[in-house]
Image (cartoon, rainbow, N blue to C red):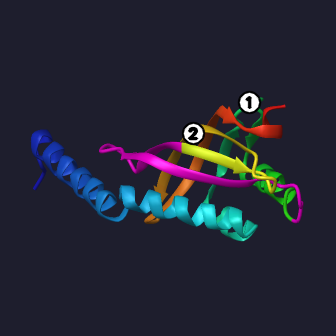
Amino acid sequence: MRLRPTVLLAVTLISASASVGSIAESCTDQGVRDARTAFNVAIRDDDLDAMAGLFDEDIVLVTGTDSDLFVGRAQQLDLWRSEVGDADRLSYLREATHVEVSPLSAIALESGVWTGKATSGDEVGGEYSAKWRCQDARWMLEAELFMTTRCTGTMCD
């Protein structure tokens, strides 16, 4: 028995709706928040393996003040690796203020505030946006864009 085009279209739409529904069930905004928390812990602990597990292969990072561009998991891990063990390294924290999961695809947009704190107590920070993609029921960071809006002490030089 051949399906008429309208019946075939209806079956296709039902199948697509089912897959979007399963994406929505496994890839929630709380999942993005949990992944962000895991990334903050990885930064704090200099855990490059944990970071790598959260980075998409083609992750993009645009820094806050100079708009330096880092593309790809390897380049971003090299950036973090250069700071491991540095006594003057800033301690970074990203805090999500809003997460929105797309109703159309397994992607999410996170926005929030970031802070880099020196051992002296001086700080630099601002706002950020991040794009995530849910792959195999886990969120992977695809892009982060930072804007510097505040600083204290020597961080303002």
Tag 1 and tag 2, C-beta contact below 8 Å? no
Foreground pick, 33 / 90: 90
Looking at the image, residue 81 sits to the left or right of residue 147; the answer is right
Q: Quadrant of the N terminus?
A: bottom left
Identified by mark 2, the residue type is Tyr
Residue 153: percent from left, percent from top: 79, 39
Looking at the image, residue 51 lies above or below residue 145: below
Where disc 1 sits, the SS reads: loop
Residue 76: percent from left, percent from top: 76, 51
Q: Residues within 10 Å of mark 2 (few under 14, many from 20)?
A: many
- Label total for image: 2
Foreground pick, 120 / 53: 120
Res 93 label: none
Residue where numbered disc 1 is placed: 67
Q: Quadrant of the C terminus?
A: top right
Q: Look at 70% across and 65% down and name the residue there.
A: 44
**Which segment is the magenta one?**
85-112
Identified by mark 1, the residue type is Ser
Residue where numbered disc 2 is placed: 128
- Find out whether residue 109 is within the magenta segment: yes
